[in-house]
Every structure is written in C-alpha cells, then in structure tokens.
Image (spheres, rainbow, N blue to C red):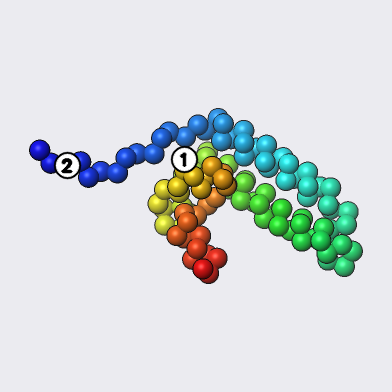
Amino acid sequence: MSADTSTPSAPPLDVIRLRRLLEHDLAQRQEIVRQAAPSAAPNLDPVSWATSTATRRVVDQITAALARLDDGTYGRCIRCGERIAGARLDVLPHAENCLDCQRRVDGA
C-alpha cells in the first residue's frame, strides 16, 4: 500500500461571508476617501493626502478581490498562481499575493 502524498485541499471558501466582509471594508474605506477629499492635497494637508492616497490603493485592491471572487480565482496568488495561505487571507482578505511573492514585491 503506498502512502498518500497529495496535499490536503483547502477548506471551501465561505463566499457569502467573504463578499460581505470585503464590501463592508470597501464602504468604510470609500467613506474615508470621501471625507478626506476636501483637504486631500499635498499642499493643503499632507497627512490627509497621504491617508487618502493609501486608502484609494486599498479600495482598488478590495475591488480586485471582489472581482477575483466573481471569477473564481480568489485565494490564488496573482503572480505565481499558488494558493494564498488561509491565515493570510484571514488577516488581509484582499491579499493578492502569497507571502513569497509579496516578499519579492516588497523587496525583502
């Protein structure tokens, strides 16, 4: 009898819960951008501008994660195609890279 060398499959995604979580986070961040808009210019309020810029970047990442949920690629690294660790997605549901690829992106 040979040993089973296959890797265990990941538990199924709770797509409804994930969608609600991502949509809630998206709404909150869009509100931050909306509230910062009147003063979010580098010459008026550099802190507000930096916060707004970073928040818009996360809004884009959340929107992309929702699109990946729709097309069935959520939970897969956009660079290498490997599965993103569940613990990473628990902490950062809009993560688009596995840890190895994210380290390369960050230059670490």
Instruction: Name which residue lies at 17% across and 42% down.
Output: 3
Q: Quadrant of the N terminus?
A: top left
Residue 28's image quarter? top right
Q: Earlier in the sequence, mark 2 or mark 1?
A: 2
Query: Which residue is disc 1 drawn over?
Result: 72
Amino acid marked by disc 1: Gly
Query: Which residue is disc 2 drawn over?
Result: 3
* CA neighbours of label 1 inside 10 A, class few (<14), some (14 to 19), many (20+): few
* CA neighbours of label 2 inside 10 A, class few (<14), some (14 to 19), many (20+): few
Q: Residue furthest left?
A: 1
* Label tally: 2
From this view, report whether residue 54 is shown above or below residue 90.
Answer: below
Instruction: Name which residue lies at 62% across and 46% down.
Output: 62
Return the x and y of residue 11 as percentages of the image width and height: 41, 35
Residue 31's image quarter? top right
In this rendering, the label closer to the viewer, 2 or 1: 2
Q: Secondary structure at mark 2?
A: loop
Kindly tell me whether residue 68 is visible in this rendering: no
Instruction: Name which residue lies at 72% across and 46% down.
Output: 29
Relative side of 31 to 21, left or right: right
Return the x and y of residue 10 as percentages of the image width and height: 39, 39
